[in-house]
Image (tube, rainbow, N blue to C red):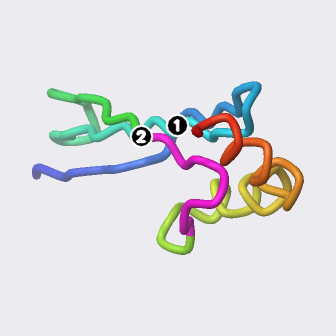
Amino acid sequence: MLEKIEIVDRIEVVENGSVQVRTKTAIMEDGKQISGNFHRHVVAPGDDYSAEDARVKAICAAVHTDKVISAYIKEQL
């Protein structure tokens, strides 16, 4: 039986408050991985993270303070 599994397997916070997220997609056959790949994306301070994994939401809520968001926006100008 084939099964597709997607999990967030790495979450990193970088100096400017951005949260880097890596999602692993694995194709399993009879409980053994036969294929897999990774997708990465960044949640910047001020971005909408409401559709993210619960752990990513919790980290963003803790890290993306008003001060961090303001500093990030100023850095982008």
* Above/below status of 63 relative to 58: above
> What label does residue 29 carry, if any?
none
Q: Point out the tag, 2 or 1, that comes first from the N-terminus.
A: 1
Residue 54 percent location from the top left of the image: 63, 65
> What label does residue 9 carry, if any?
1
Q: Nearer the viewer, residue 14 or 40?
A: 14
Quadrant occupied by the C terminus: top right
Looking at the image, the residue that sits furthest to the left is: 1
x 52%, y 37%: residue: 9
Is 37 positioned to the left or the right of 52 in the image? left
Is 50 positioned to the left or the right of 36 in the image? right
Q: Which element type, helix, strand or loop, lies under badge 1?
A: strand
x 66%, y 63%: residue: 57
x 56%, y 35%: residue: 20
* Above/below status of 32 relative to 23: above
Q: Is residue 24 magenta?
A: no
Residue 21 percent location from the top left of the image: 51, 39
How many dots with numbers?
2
Task: Identify residue for label 2.
Answer: 41
Residue type at mark 1 is: Asp
Q: Quadrant of residue 23?
A: top left
Q: Which element type, helix, strand or loop, lies under badge 2?
A: strand
Residue 71 percent location from the top left of the image: 79, 43
Residue 62 percent location from the top left of the image: 85, 56
* Above/below status of 20 relative to 66: above
Real-space Cα distance between discs 2 and 1?
A: 12 Å
Please state which of the two labelled residues, at mark 2 or mark 1, is closer to the viewer.
2
Segment tinted magenta in the rendering: 42-49
Q: Quadrant of residue 49?
A: bottom right
Which class describes the residues within 10 Å of circle 2: few (<14), some (14-19), or many (20+)? few
Residue type at mark 2 is: His
The overriding secondary structure of the stretch rendered in magenta is loop
